[in-house]
Image: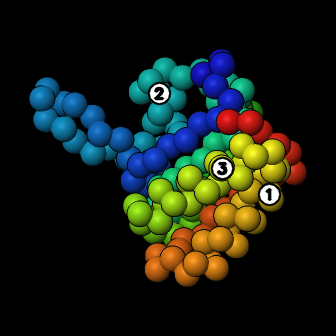
Amino acid sequence: MDETRVFVAYTHGNSSSIALVENNNGSLQRRNLSINDISEKFYFKNDYFANIDLAVLISCSAGDESAGSEAFANRLYNNNGSSQFTGARTVIAFNNPVYYDDSVRWKGLFFSYLSSGNTIKVALENTNEYVTGNKYSNYFGYVPIGDTDRTINP
């Protein structure tokens, strides 16, 4: 990920892990992976996500802070207090269930606002205003972690 500045994970998840599908001798199996699991299984260096300016986790409850310091979003953030892991500069994650159709709309709107030169914070505010103004039936909340007062051109 040396060249990657924006990382988007669009998958199933919970407060402490995201789900990936693993091929186990021809049988596909869902597997929940924490940051530690990902580092160990895929041999990521502790600074693997260090060059990421923005990580967006579009998965259920990845931003749910009830898991505390072990919350997936907190662990992916670079200022998480861990001397063993350096993560992304800004992380956006959802703290509720994420519904597919609404998340597709959210993702498109957010990245459209972001690529128009808005800061992360303004892109989030504009997306939130549009989503709530149009009363999407399955609106879900998000948690921004880190520096949102800057622009990124995805």
Tell me the element at label 2: helix
Quadrant of the snapshot with the C terminus: top right
Horizontal side, residue 13 vs residue 64: left or right:
left
- Asked which quadrant contains residue 106, the reply is bottom right
Horizontal side, residue 147 vs residue 64: left or right:
right
- First in sequence: mark 3 vs mark 1: 3
Horizontal side, residue 130 vs residue 101: left or right:
right
Q: Residue furthest right?
A: 149
Tell me the element at label 1: helix
- First in sequence: mark 2 vs mark 3: 2
Tell me the element at label 3: helix
Query: Where does the image place residue 12, in percent across and percent down from the top left?
Result: 39, 53
Label 2 to label 3, Cα distance in Å?
35 Å
Which colour scheme appears in the figure? rainbow
Q: Mark 3 points at which residue?
A: 112
Residue at position x 47%, y 56% in the image? 104
Q: Residue 40 carries which label?
A: 2
Amino acid on which the number 2 mark rests in the picture? Glu
For label 2, the crowd category at 10 Å Cα-Cα, with few meaning under 14, some 14 to 19 and many 20 or more, is few
Q: Name the residue under label 1.
A: 121
Q: Between 105 and 66, which is closer to the camera in this rendering?
A: 105
Query: Where does the image place residue 4, in percent across and percent down from the top left?
Result: 64, 25
Q: Which of marks 2 and 3 is in front?
A: 3
- First in sequence: mark 2 vs mark 1: 2
